[in-house]
Image (cartoon, helix red, strand yellow):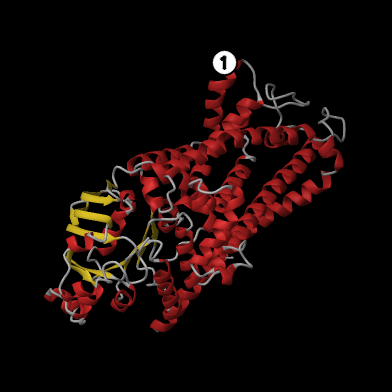
Amino acid sequence: MSASPRSGVTGKEESLEGPVSSKQIAQAGPKLRASNVDFFYGKFQALHNVSIDFPENQITALIGPSGCGKSTFLRTLNRINDTIRGARVTGEVVLDGSSITEVDVTELRRRVGMVFQRPNPFPKSIFDNIAYGVRINGLARRSEIHEVVERSLRRAALWEEVKDKLHQSAYSLSGGQQQRLCIARALAVDPEILLLDEPCSALDPIATSKIEELLLSIRDQCTLIIVTHNMQQAARVADLTGFFLMGRLVEFNKTDFIFKTPAKKETEDYITGRFG
Amino acid sequence: MLRIWRHAVNNVMLSLTGICAFVTASALFLILGYLIWNGGKSLDWNFFTKLPLSPGELGGGMANAIIGSAKIVALAALIGVPVGFMSGVYIAEFSGKAMANLIRYSADLLNGVPSIVIGIFAWTLLVVPMHHFSAWAGGFALSLMVIPVTLRATEQFLGQIPQSLREGALALGASKWKSVATVIIPAARTGIMTGIILGVARVSGETAPLLFTALNNQYWSKGFNEPTSSLPVMIYTHAMSPYDDWHRQAWAAGLVLLGLVLIANIAARMVLARGAASQRG
């Protein structure tokens, strides 16, 4: 993979002069492409015609005020919204050239991992939490599982803190550690994409900065899409940023542009704190 | 004036509720004390090892009734727990809302069916066609009482598992069944087990469903196909008899039965407490 840090889209310094169209971004190879996605909870339409290309090995942040649909959109990408009664999606999401409705849903979710707003470790040991996805997907032999667990915990920068208590309950960890455990658990099944739904909203600033470091360290192995209500966080970690408002994607561009020279007035108002 | 009135009302209500609470608690201890007083005198080692004797002969025991009760209750649990548990899982995790309401309501009604009626039902269904009383029929009758209790416990404790755990498992590529079997049920395990223990302990004291099904037996019963004695029915027949020695045996049987149920209750609470402690880490 050619994606050394800050290469790809943001590496082309000359193209930083103007807004990038989705087409230009697509040249870096969209790992995941959402086209004209509408989403309905019953009769309520939560998303209107959202189209985004997510380039490989980049961090894309989705920002916007509460209730703007950014989480709903994220949750359509691994079809976890399918579990909600009365939910309906139209439009298309394409992963590596095939529509996600044609891929087996368990295989899709193995390839497109997810980390949730609140840490949700299983009531099992630290070891069993990480091993869970590997075991149910039959990804490693029994003898290799220990190795996978260690590697995943190292990738999530948690190994040193938990290596002596792998068989203690995951609930014995602090909130920030639990969230890194959940990231390690997601990484253990080698996802190609990792979706993060406000992963730091329940954490303090120190735990948050650890997670942000972690995200930057795994972006060369994994395409990351992060929903956040924290604009500074988007500015710190994301290569690309999309701004959602009332179920619509208002603007999508390189993060620098969104924060320095937003094209739309709504974006500027939100960025400068005039609402939201 | 108003203040005195308020004060008086407060005192009256406080004493009234306090007295009722005291009555509730003392009922258990009165029963327990009475049983220990009367049953303790008659309880000896023979009670656990010997068969009942004919009226007039002193001594004897209820070994056959203890084993018989164990057989019938085990049978009831073996039939009732899986059926109740599976249907609980079905309505908590898989069925639609309307179906869940229908099944839950049916279970509540089944729970409310008088136990004597359950006895008659099992009698018609099993005893009449088989032409004899049996442990099978007794176990079947009691299993009908285990099912609704197990179902409600299963549903209740599965319902308390947060949605975030379900999504966590699904997001790792687990199928619905796998997520339920490997994350949701283990997370609710201690609560469900407690409910089952309490339910099974409750039916082990039932008399009416056994009167028409397992009947009774003064001797050992082989296998599950013969009339089988049980502690509750033994208490019933001995207490109704005119013989003093049989009355003493009935008291002893009552004490043993209550002891077993209390042990099951305490065990259930310990399981629950330990489960809660281990989940907190």
Image x and y of residue B32, in percent = 70, 53
Pointer 1 indicates a residue of which chain? B
Residue A146, quarter of picture: bottom right
The residue carrying mark 1 is: B129
Residue B39 visible here:
yes
Image x and y of residue B11, in percent = 50, 75
Q: Residue at x 22, y 63 (%)?
A: A25
Quadrant containing the N terminus of chain A in the rendered view? bottom left
In this image, A2 relative to A166: left or right? left
How many numbered dots are placed on residues in this image? 1
Residue A125 visible here:
no
Closest to the observer, A225 or B179: A225
Vertically, is B222 above or below B20? above
Residue A273, quarter of picture: bottom left
Closest to the observer, A47 or B141: A47
Residue B120, quarter of picture: top right
Q: Secondary structure at mark 1?
A: helix
In this image, A183 relative to B272: left or right? left
Q: Residue at x 68, y 51 (%)?
A: B262
Query: Badge 1, how many Cα within 10 Å: few under 14, some, many 20+?
Result: few
Closest to the observer, B90 or A78: A78
Image x and y of residue B236, in percent = 68, 35
Q: Amino acid at mark 1?
A: Pro
Image x and y of residue B10, in percent = 47, 75
In this image, A204 relative to B278: left or right? left
Vertically, is A110 above or below A15? above
